[in-house]
Image: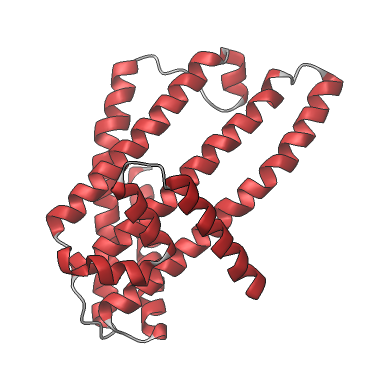
Amino acid sequence: MGRIYGFAEKFEHAVDAASAPLPSQGIKLWLAGFFRPEETYEKVEKTATLAGLAGNLLIFYFAYSLIFFLFMLVLTSSLSEGDLLSMGLQKSPDLAQAALGSLVIGPIASALSALFAFALVFISARVLGGDGTYAKQANSMSLVLCGSNILLLAFMCVAFAIFIPSFLLRDSAFVGSIVSIATLLASLPLFLMCLAILVYTIYAYYLVARKAHNISSWRAAGAIVIAAALVVLLDIALNAVLA
């Protein structure tokens, strides 16, 4: 466990160093909320409001969607139709419609989904004896969400960049095979890092729930598990209805 904590601390320091030159204090706050959820909760709980919570999520998801949209636009413009199809992608026939969906509808829907998920945690925690407020709990959880997604987006962009050469050289049996093997080996650490980020995100949500509602570790864990189970069940039910 000591090695794991040591690696996590080094990773946090590396991210802090990389984000230090950034002019946006919001990004630094998101990363702080992700790496140090309990400490950050204490700093922002007095200023937490529902309006600020919704605004933070909308700003994040718009910026996130814009970066992803521009990245995909460059990617789809740079590769041929065959290369895109081999990657499971295709060019959008209507750029304006794609932009509307990605930059307007997408951020709003994502923000509402996050608010709903945080509400499920809040209800579960209160049922289990918590005494926190939704605004304070959800505000800190939104910081965790934003911080984790920033890191995942960065790793995803790197992974896409690593995989591009293997698609461009796939017609060359020898060189293509070597590049594909090298790509898989290079992408494995990225996959493991993304998996670690996802696992830690759940842990950070647990820390926020425990801190915000002043409940025991078991009750905080129970609130997260119940909320996650409800999200899964609702997703299954929604897919069944729409199928």
Residue 127, can we see it? yes
User: Which quadrant is the C terminus positioned in?
Assistant: top left
User: Which quadrant is the N terminus positioned in?
Assistant: bottom right
Q: Is residue 7 above or below residue 96?
A: below
How far from the left and from the top, in percent, is residue 237? Answer: 35, 55
Residue 65 located left or right of residue 83: left
Q: Nearer the viewer, residue 145 or 85?
A: 145
Q: Is residue 48 above or below residue 178?
A: below
How far from the left and from the top, in percent, is residue 189? Answer: 67, 49
Residue 1, can we see it? no
Q: Is residue 62 above or below residue 82?
A: below
Residue 55 located left or right of residue 183: left
Q: Residue at x 41, y 18 (%)?
A: 92
Q: Residue at x 35, y 72 (%)?
A: 38
Q: Nearer the viewer, residue 206 or 117?
A: 206
Residue 104 located left or right of residue 157: left
Q: How is the image coloured?
A: secondary structure
Q: Nearer the viewer, residue 1 or 82?
A: 1
How far from the left and from the top, in percent, is residue 29? Answer: 32, 55
